Amino acid sequence: MNLTLLIVQLLNGLQLGILLFLLASGLTLIFGIMNFVNLAHGSLYMVGAFLCATFTQLTDSFILGVLLALPATAIFGLLLDRIVVRYLYQRDHLDHVLATFGLILVLNTAAHMIWGPDGIVVPLPGWLDTRVEPLAGVVIPVYRLAIIAVGMAVAAGLYLLITKTRIGMRIRAGASNRDMIGALGVDINLLFTFVFALGAVLAGLAGMMVAPITEASIGMGNSIIIVTLVVIVIGGIGSIKGAFIAAIIVGLIDTMGRSYLDVLFEQFMSIQNAETSAPAISAMLIYILMAAVLAVRPQGLFPPKGR
Amino acid sequence: MSLSNLGIRGSVIVLVMILLALVPVLAAVTDNAFYLDVATRLVILAMAAVSLNLILGNGGMISLGHAAFIGIGAYSVGIPAYYDMYNGFIQIPLAIAASALFALITGAICLRTKGVNFIMITMAFAQMLFFAFVSIEEYGGDDGLVINVRSEFGGLIDLEDNVSLYYLSFVSLLAVLYLVHRIVNSRFGMVIGGAKGNERRMQSLGFNTYRYQLTAYVIAGAICGYAGTLLGSFTNFISPEMLDWSRSGELLFMVVLGGTGTLFGPVLGAAAFLLLEEYLSPLQDYLLFDGAGIYWQFSFGIILILVVLFGKGGIVGFLDRLDEKRQRRKAKGHD
């Protein structure tokens, strides 16, 4: 095992964790406040990536593309909430699952109609598309560091918003006891629309940041939404803190499992057995973690107080 | 009971079942094997949907991982076939045992959770299995595995003949419907239904609802695993894609589309689902413009959302409302 690879993989895991947090924070608030299961949250991630790709092409600047795509994704989230989602608040979970499953099909196909079947490459500006070598032999793309920095900044901003502002107080209250805050005169629907749009922006931002690495493509949200759901369930539905910790844990475990599980297995089984079983186990690792957490704590690690 | 007593709901169900029984004849007369293909898939998926409905409609357990059992069943045909073991009398018990065991282990953990967490953890277990099959290179990994020879039953029935396979599936569906009917109306089924309505009340009546729910979960998994063996034989192919979470979502949709908690609802739902899947694309080509068909999932998704928002009770619910209207009109006529 060499140190260089370890550092690079740790950063990769951290980066995945940050992206997962951006998706999970919005989703967990939406769950927490309206008890609304939104499988289509991954589609907002995709929409963010495609909008960013389009605006980047129009303006020839990735940064401008992101700055334009952020409000556009917020508006998209608002529209989605007004047109479809708000009719689902009062329904049960089964209806949420099915309707948002339908929404995924609609949005994926709509993206196909608008942007075509192929992915769109999003070029990075030169100053982001370089590498640094902080330690001899440890080469890290600047863009990865930028993703981590932006994600940390957003997490800090979100923390301040939730803990220090009036709207944050209402969001926390809503996650603890929806009926009570409604009875105290807070317009819970308005609050939820705000949270839904906020969640859309956060998910969209994750999509925009990942687009230069993977390109914007149809169905890119389909697999990450599952991992995001795992994150919020592990963290405890409705808890931002839980989402953050679980996202980092899941990001690290997934990345480290994929790169080091075979080495670990070789310690106590033949190399051949280790090489065949390690990929299978490492792909299942986060689900095993989720099952283990739920078996011990059915509410997740940090369930919001008061429910 | 005479035919006129069936009402609209009963008549439609009887009509659909008769039609299903006659599909091979229709396919032979019209010389169109495509009908038989669709009908076989329909009947097998209907079986899976009926098993899902046992826990969903009667037990209130929203599982988003039911396709895992289809996968287990299909792989129970595919993996032995990979080692040249085609005996259905081994494959099918293997599928049922493996599905039941998977349901027992995962269900024991899932049922500790409630609400959203139950949905998520059932899905997580199915995804776990999905990734396990994806990463087992020996059995094709991502690309799946071709099944050269379908399940063999020692000359008793030849599944290589598509009509035989169809009738085996159809008779199995009837048997499953009867079994589920008996379960739902038994004391056991009453406890499951009671726990759906008010779990705490059933517990204070002295029932260990957890055990009852787990048993129902295992039964549903085993039935679905059996359906999976037929699907594996039918498609001559298995791949992890069969147990992807969107397949589980589709099964849920079939149940809701047909009518949750009704015996024949999932069958009608599966039929409507497959008809949409097969004909929405050519319909769009025909109605809109050439090439519009590839976007069929757009209208499919909208239909799904509309069914959820406005289709109270699914197809069976709709037929019931027609029946009610007719009753009222009749009553008025007598005045």
Image: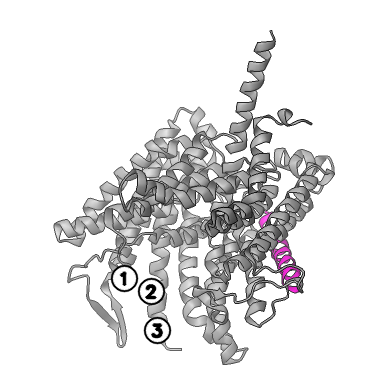
Quadrant of the image for the C terminus of chain A?
Answer: top right
The answer to whether marks 2 and 3 sit on the same chain is yes
Who is closer to the viewer here, B322 or A66?
B322
Find disc 3 in the rendering and name its residue.
A5
Secondary structure that dominates the magenta span = helix
* C-alpha gap between disc 2 and disc 3: 10 Å
Mark 3 residue crowding within 10 angstroms, few (<14) / some (14–19) / many (20+): some
**Magenta range:** B90-112
Question: How far apart are the two marked residues, 2 and 1, measured between alpha carbons?
Answer: 8 Å
Q: Is residue B309 above or below residue A10?
A: above
Q: Are marks 2 and 1 in contact (CB under 8 Å)?
A: yes
Q: List the residue tagged with mark 1.
A: A144
Q: Are marks 2 and 1 on the same chain?
A: yes
For this orientation, the residue located farthest to the top is B335
Q: Chain of mark 3?
A: A
Which secondary structure lies at badge 1? helix
Query: In screen coordinates, is B167 left or right of A4?
Result: right
